[in-house]
Structure formats: structure tokens, C-alpha cells
Image (cartoon, grey):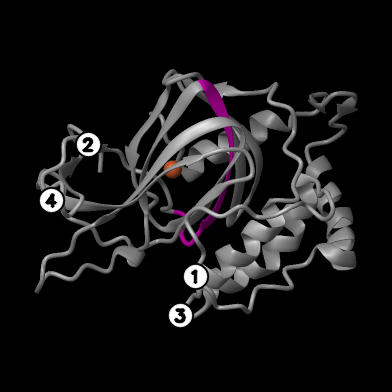
Amino acid sequence: MQFWTVDTLKSHTLADHEQGEEISPGVVVQRRTFLRLGLSAAGLAALSGLGLSGCATGSRATSKGGPGPASAAASADEFVAAVMPQARALISAQAPDEEAYLAAVTTLLARVEPPPTWRMSPTGQGWDIDNIAYYPPIVLMQIKMAPKSVIHLHDHRHYNGVLLATQGAARCRNIDIVQPDGNRLDVADGEVPAKGEDFLIRQNVDTVLRPRQLSTLTRDRDNIHHVEAGDEGATLVDFFTHFSPKARSYELAWDGKPYDQAKGLFKVSWKDA
Ligand SMILES: [Fe+2]
């Protein structure tokens, strides 16, 4: 399966942090708890200037926005430590403001220096995953895509995310389920058309992400996407916030041909839901 479940993430996290493993050049894990201890130290760094000061903006995150020049580099652990309190508050809120959260996260994510792409887990699909950090409810990974490789059409059920290009270029198309009148689905809560049914989706965004450009999606805005690397391939940083242990992606079947070109509609069905 190309998309990871929470259980897959857990297994990769343990596999990534075994005693004796070199987690970056010259840094060897002494104990399995190494990164958690590192996170505590990083939390102190977060308090000294990397916090989410812009989290109360309430603005809608753009699907493509240059986050601007980085004012200070941050490690992945510092990023996780800074975001964690907001992530926990978000998923426990009565009415989570995902747009404000993502707007703040993208500012901070732009400062993160991704680790070298030297410990990738192959998916067999032409793109490989490096699980940088998994501290529930946060997932930080990077994806290295071979030239012209495709991450097929899939949703992000029970989670939101940010996709930030760091190398190369990738075409990113964001899509939502079309909800017929009288059949409103609580997509944010994981309510979707049934498996085996054909249904319509509408493409909202079709853009090419280049380094420092990003795409965001919430549980019910632009939640489905299709990513295709350009001629030189692409490296992308993915940041996810899970609202439930059931968070995972499901692939959709489509032929890529518009059902209604003027309205940007396509007919699809779930492949593995
Ligand atoms: Fe995705």
C-alpha cells in the first residue's frame, strides 16, 4: 500500500530510531528515547522565538503561497516542539479553526531545514518517503519523487496537511467531493460517498509547486489531491495533523478526463476505501 496508516507510521518510527542507528551523519541514537529527550530540549528553543505567534489570524490559508524568506532556520525537532501545543489544542477544540492553524504552521515550516534525503523508504511507485518525525498527532515527512512520478489521486481522511516543495517541481491539483443538494456529508468527520458508488469531484486548484511554494488542505477543503513530479523530479516536505487514530489516505479511481470541463468536474470512485 502506498499510503501509510498510523500503524505503518509507528512501525517506521521504531525502525528509524533503533539503538545504534545513525539518524543523521555523525549522530548515533544511544537509546530509543533519544529523540524524545531531544524534543524536550528543542521545546526550550521554541520558547525563545519559534512559537506560533501568528496563530490567531483567522485568515484562510492560500493553496499556493511563497512563505517568504526564512528569518531563522529551525530543526525538525524544534518545529515539532513549537507546533505541538497548537496541534493538541486544534484537535480537541469544539470548532477547530484549521485555516488559522495552517496559516501559522506554514510560516514556521518555511524555516525548517529538512534533513538530507538519505534514509528513504521506497513505496515502489517512483517516490520514496522519509518519516522525519511522528509524535501524535503530528507527522513530518519528506517525499522524494523521481522525474515524472505520480502520487495518485487520494484523500486525507481525518487529517489536514501542508505540502512544501524544497527541490525540483511538482504539479499539484487539489480537489473536493461535490455534495449534491439534499445529501450533505460531514466530510471533516470522515463522512464520504460509499465504496462502489461513482461520485463527482471538483478541481479547485491546479498549480506547479517550486521550492518554497506550498499547498495546504483541511479536512473539508482541497482534501483530495494528485501530485505529479516534473522532468527533474521533486522533493517535498509533508506536514500532517491527525484528528483521529483512523487518519489515513484512500486512493480514488479516475481516468483523468473531465466529466464536465467547464465546471472542473470528474467522476470517480474509491479504490480501497
Ligand atoms: Fe497527500
Residue range of the region highlighted in magenta in the rendering: 232-245
Frontmost of labels 1 and 4 is 1
Query: Could you tell me if residue 227 is visible in this image?
Result: yes
Q: In the depicted view, which residue is nearer to us: 1 or 185?
A: 185
The amino acid sitting under disc 3 is Ala
Q: Which residue is mark 3?
A: 95
Quadrant in the picture for residue 142 = top right
The amino acid sitting under disc 1 is Arg
For marks 2 and 1, the one nearer the N-term is: 1
Q: From mark 3 to mark 4, how far is it between C-alphas?
A: 28 Å
Judge the density around disc 4: few (<14), some (14-19), many (≥20) Cα neighbours within 10 Å: some
Q: Which residue is mark 2?
A: 271
Q: Quadrant of ligand 1?
A: top left
Q: Residue at x 64, y 44 (%)?
A: 212
For marks 4 and 2, the one nearer the N-term is: 4
For marks 3 and 4, the one nearer the N-term is: 3
Frontmost of labels 3 and 4 is 4
Q: Which residue is mark 1?
A: 60
Q: Secondary structure at mark 3?
A: loop
In the rendered image, the quadrant that contains the N terminus is: top left
Q: Which residue is mark 4?
A: 199
What kind of secondary structure does the magenta stretch mostly adopt?
strand
Is 253 displayed left or right of 103 in the figure? left
Q: From mark 1 to mark 4, how far is it between C-alphas?
A: 27 Å
From what the image shows, is residue 183 above or below residue 18?
A: below
* Residue 235 numbered mark, or none: none
Q: Residue at x 87, y 27 (%)?
A: 28
Is 84 displayed left or right of 210 in the figure? right
